[in-house]
Amino acid sequence: MRKGRRTPSAFIPQPVDLADFFADRLFMKKRSVILTSATLTVRGRFAYMTRRLGLDEFYPLCRSFPASFRYEEQAALFVPADMPLASAVSVETYAEAAAAAITAVARRVGRRLLVLFPSYELLKMTVEALKNDEADEPFVLIAQGVQSGSPAKLIRTFLQFERAVLFGTSGFWEGVDLPGDALDALIIARLPFAPPDDPVMEAKSERIRARGGDPFYELSLPEAVLRLKQGVGRLIRTERDKGVVFVLDRRLTNAPYRADFLASLPPFPVHEGGLLELLDAADAWLWQGRRPNGV
């Protein structure tokens, strides 16, 4: 019997903390540096990013400027209260509930939907649950990691269909531009906390514990807040866009740290309730007499 070849192992080092690197290699060598982003603040404060970038000793001037979008008129946020609590059930159970909610939103509310996942594991399980009933659905499923191709290729495929649902993780949370009629609804399947077994997060958490800090509030929570801000930013890209956001994770509105998320998001109107009730409200709010043919 011919033995198969063993795949060689590789160790790739990655720095745990880049604060000193930025301070010594960049900020100390420049007269001035301008850093701009839509996701530099948590609850309106720059403290987390200032510490992360090694700017504590440079006393940076920090300013926030209001966006030109009319968020209260252009988007609304919906949180189904009848979803299972993400932290209290298995990934499989949550994926099944997420699949049912995504199907309901796709049938009722929008023509093109983008669904964002914090992990490929949850994405794959949710897509598998959806595929069991896909034959009778009027929309096409396009999923990162299931269909081959780069994010750009998947988006091109997505835009070829009048009714489609695009499932993405990793790179889809940022840098994706779907303005105008390209996107009607955004679904956040679960709050984007990093997996607890992520080696980089584990190493960073150990350093925080060693100095007596709290890894959740000093690292996991602000990272998740910034990631959610990036994800929600996929919806409203121009001053003429209009759409709805469904966050299926009800920790957004009932967890002790909910204010960190809500105060960091654009000032969308927030609606809570049963999914069927929210579908009626989202449908009425989004279309308001301008429903396109076939929806």
Image: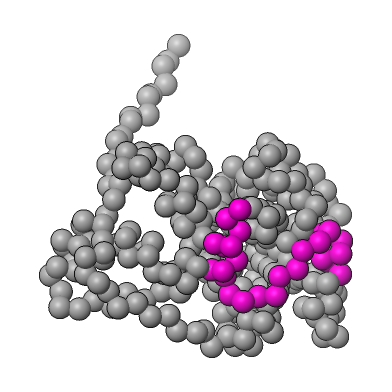
Tell me what residue is drawn at x 77 percent, y 63 percent: 272
Q: Is 275 covered by the magenta stretch?
A: yes
The stretch of residues the image draws in magenta is 256-280
Q: Residue 72: where, in percent of width, then height?
A: 67, 82
Q: Is residue 97 visible?
A: yes
Q: Is 229 covered by the magenta stretch?
A: no
User: Between residues 46 and 120, which one lies in front from this camera angle?
Assistant: 46
Query: Which of the 4 image quarters holds residue 214?
Result: top left
Q: Residue 258: where, in percent of width, then height?
A: 61, 59
Q: Report the side of 289 relative to 27 (left or right).
A: right
Q: Is residue 41 above or below residue 253?
A: below
Q: Is residue 149 above or below residue 71?
A: above
Q: Is residue 199 above or below residue 154?
A: above
Tell me what residue is drawn at x 20 percent, y 62 percent: 23
Q: Report the side of 152 relative to 181 (left or right).
A: left
Q: Quadrant of the N terminus?
A: top left
Q: How is the image coloured?
A: one colour
Q: Residue 121: where, in percent of width, then height?
A: 59, 42
Q: Report the side of 37 relative to 83 (left or right).
A: left
User: Between residues 173 and 271, which one lies in front from this camera angle?
Assistant: 271
Q: Residue furthest left?
A: 29
Q: Residue furthest top?
A: 1
